[in-house]
Amino acid sequence: MALESVIIAGGGMAGFTCAKELRARGFEGRISIVDPEGIPYDRPPLSKGYLLGDQDATQIRLIAAEWFDENNIEIITSSVVDLDTETPSVTLADGTVREADKIVLATGGTARRLPIPGGQLPTVLELRTRADADHLRSVLTEGTRLAIVGAGLIGAEVASSALKFGAQVTLIDPVDPPLIPAVGETLANRLHQMHTENGIKLITGVPTEISVDNDGVHTLALADGSEVIADVVLVGIGIVADTVLATTAGLDTDNGILVDLSQRTSHPNLYAIGDTARTRLEDGTLLRRAEHWEHAMNTGATAAAALLGQELPTHGASWFWSDRHGVHVEGVGSMLGEGTQVIREQDGVPVAAFRIDGEGLLAGCAAIDGGMLVRAARRIIDKKKPVSAEQLADPAVDLKKLAR
Ligand SMILES: Cc1cc2nc3c(=O)[nH]c(=O)nc-3n(C[C@H](O)[C@H](O)[C@H](O)COP(=O)(O)OP(=O)(O)OC[C@H]3O[C@@H](n4cnc5c(N)ncnc54)[C@H](O)[C@@H]3O)c2cc1C
């Protein structure tokens, strides 16, 4: 039976891309996106330009609001509260039931809370939505003592942004330096040092309890017995994939909704994409669940192709970026695993890191202010082009030429 209607639960990058791709690939049937946040917007600016006030709510929309009418895509500002896999249908927050031929789950995740006493306090903040960013901006003023737990991507970005408000920032992470799996040890060290160079207090430690007094001042007790006093506490320790609907509906889940390479869940009527989905290969191997913007986009496009019975698009090695302290970081492939780590320096400063795997092929690359280099490295990875450690380490070697 030809596909006539699709409901997408969640209008983040994944859900939006799926709808856009369905239309781009010629689908003329009904598309509805259900999201309590309404018109889809982009999350990366929430810790960068939007938090700083350089971009407003309209500027971070994934596309102009009119585009949805022009493309006959219905935006339902509500939540999906229940799923029926057989009909199939979704129940919205007001009890309305909507049927469609296929349902795509693109519900992302919720910010992981600290599993310690005080970790659930409403004054312990998280950053996942535009409202979270609005609130955070409203409490960041000159001299605000901001404690951030988690110095990975979002924590580090907020720490850097908060300095522009004149906040006194303390960044706490159990690992020194964080991000080794993403960028390798050398660049992770350089990035972590930038925090201190910019006036942020770094603490390697584990919070064991958070309390707040009547004046709203927080005390974070750390495992080594020390304390951090803060007016504002933000926790940035990753997300928990939103699997509640899927689990209730009987879909296979395991730290994410399990999908095959076409983003299909364990039920043929349901697909899952973006942060909430986790790939299970045919032999049962579970891949690591990605929490990156481009992955959300790619999986949205794959699901659209699969829903229409079209050839699945191929995507290159996974890619992410981060911005902090005026530098732009990008990474591609995987820096984690066996093999050789190679560092490229410019004037004695490490600017790029590479991993050559056990078979002698480039498996991962990360760079600071080296977007072109990372793009070239991605082509080398995707094409499995042989490159030597000497070439990668030499700043005079143009990776673009090696990628041809
Ligand atoms: C502050 C911040 C900064 C980031 N910076 C970067 C970066 O620099 N680089 C990078 O690569 N990635 C970054 N990311 C990660 C990236 O934004 C995510 O990987 C991406 O947004 C995932 O898209 P998604 O569509 O899967 O999920 P989401 O963007 O989380 O969207 C899920 C949507 O589902 C909706 N929803 C949830 N439950 C329901 C329900 N029951 N019914 C209906 N709708 C529901 C939510 O309202 C939400 O709009 C950042 C994320 C954040 C929060």
Image: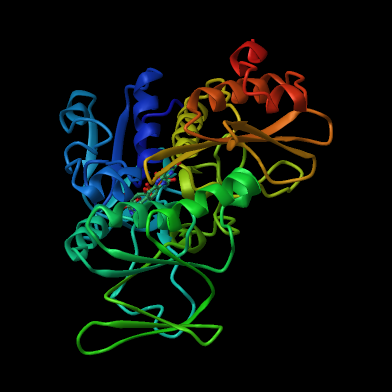
Q: Residue furthest front?
A: 347
Q: Residue at x 48, y 57 (%)?
A: 246
User: Is residue 109 visible in the rendered structure shown here?
Assistant: no
Picture coordinates of residue 310 (x, y %)?
Answer: 53, 21
Judging depth in this view, the residue of 366 and 45 nearest the camera is: 366
Residue 339 seen: yes
Kindly identify the residue that appears in the image at 34 percent across and 23 percent down. Answer: 23
Colour scheme of the rendered structure = rainbow
Q: How many marks?
A: 0
**Depth order, front residue of 1/305:** 305
Quadrant housing residue 154: bottom left
Q: Is residue 209 above or below residue 147?
A: below
259 with respect to 336 (left or right): left
Q: Quadrant of residue 327?
A: top left
> What residue appears at the point 44 percent right and 85 percent down from the top-left corner?
117
Location of residue 53 with respect to 261 vertically, above or below: below
> In the figure, is residue 359 to the left or right of 13?
right
Residue at position x 20%, y 66% in the image = 139
Residue 81: x %, y % from top left: 34, 60
Q: Percent position (x, y) of residue 224?
A: 56, 84
Quadrant in which the C terminus appears: top right
Kindly indicate the quadrant of the structure image that contains residue 396.
top right
Q: Nearer the viewer, residue 296 or 331?
A: 331
- In the shown orientation, is residue 359 left or right of residue 32? right
Percent position (x, y) of residue 129? 29, 54
